[in-house]
């Protein structure tokens, strides 16, 4: 799967407090998760607090590797390139699915082993996620029901168990903005 690079433009302030372009270029952190059958993660930015501190010239907080969830009390924006789904995902065992999520520090998010799981990559995170389809299409699979989302569609994922399936014959590119959340007692 060949994908276009993601350009990141970051603004800041100079010594006199004037607005400047601090960075302009391709994002530096990309990683395919789950081997050849998995999505390419393009890590764009994260914050570590809410409200996010805005200072003169700091950059993105340092982070090792790729982590699924945003930092505690923080946010994350990433772009995923999700290839067409094949037998590798369709025949994935619950153990393989958990290992897939463990690559991004979220092995416990995997719900493939739960009775009645509708997809090998069903998962749940304690986040609010805004997913904006940029190109292609994906099927959003829920415990009950599913829907196809296409370029221009926006999904608001509210800590629900879900999976994504690319049932088309081409790549899907989707941007996610993830916001740290807290489950209410009845949903925990």
Image: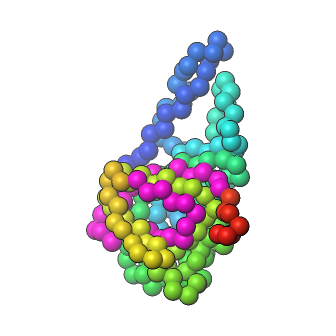
Closer-to-camera residue (26/71): 71
Which residue occupies 66% across, 30% down? 54
Q: Position of residue 72 (x, y in %)?
A: 71, 52
Range drawn in magenta:
154-181
Q: Position of residue 111 (x, y in %)?
A: 58, 77
Is residue 170 one of those drawn in magenta? yes
The residue lying furthest to the top in this view is: 16
The residue lying furthest to the bottom in this view is: 115
Which residue occupies 30% across, 68% down? 168
Q: Position of residue 64 (x, y in %)?
A: 68, 53
Name the quarter where the C terminus is drawn.
bottom right
The residue lying furthest to the front in this view is: 186
**Residue 65 seen by the camera:** no
Closer-to-camera residue (39/187): 187
Q: Residue 99 falls in which quadrant of the image?
A: bottom right
Q: Residue 105 falls in which quadrant of the image?
A: bottom right
The residue lying furthest to the left in this view is: 169
Which residue occupies 64% across, 12% down? 16
Residue 82, relative to residue 180: is it above or below?
below
Task: Name the dominant secondary structure of the magenta segment.
Answer: strand
Q: Residue 65 falls in which quadrant of the image?
A: bottom right
Instruction: Report the side of 110 relative to 86 (left or right).
Output: right
Name the quarter where the N terminus is drawn.
bottom left
Instruction: Report the side of 130 relative to 102 (left or right).
Output: left
Residue 142, relative to residue 31: is it above or below?
below
Q: Position of residue 98 (x, y in %)?
A: 60, 76
Which residue occupies 70% across, 49% down? 73
**Residue 82 seen by the camera:** yes
Residue 2, relative to residue 34: is it above or below?
above
């Amino acid at each position: 799967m060949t994908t276009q690079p993601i350009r990141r433009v970051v603004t800041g302030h100079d010594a006199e407090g004037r607005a400047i372009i601090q960075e302009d270029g391709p994002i530096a952190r990309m990683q395919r998760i789950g081997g050849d059958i998995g999505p390419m993660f393009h890590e764009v930015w994260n914050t570590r607090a809410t409200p996010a501190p805005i200072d003169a010239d700091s950059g993105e907080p340092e982070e090792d590797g790729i982590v699924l969830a945003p930092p505690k009390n923080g946010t994350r924006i990433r772009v995923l390139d999700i290839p067409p789904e094949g037998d590798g995902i369709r025949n994935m065992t619950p153990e393989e699915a958990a290992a897939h999520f463990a690559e991004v520090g979220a092995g416990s998010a995997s719900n493939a082993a739960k009775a009645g799981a509708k997809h090998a990559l069903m998962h749940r995170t304690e986040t609010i996620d805004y997913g904006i389809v940029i190109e292609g299409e994906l099927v959003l699979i829920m415990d009950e029901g599913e829907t196809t989302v296409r370029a221009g569609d926006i999904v608001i994922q509210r800590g629900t168990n879900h999976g994504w399936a690319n049932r088309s014959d081409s790549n899907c590119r989707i941007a996610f903005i993830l916001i740290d959340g807290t489950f209410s007692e009845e949903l925990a």
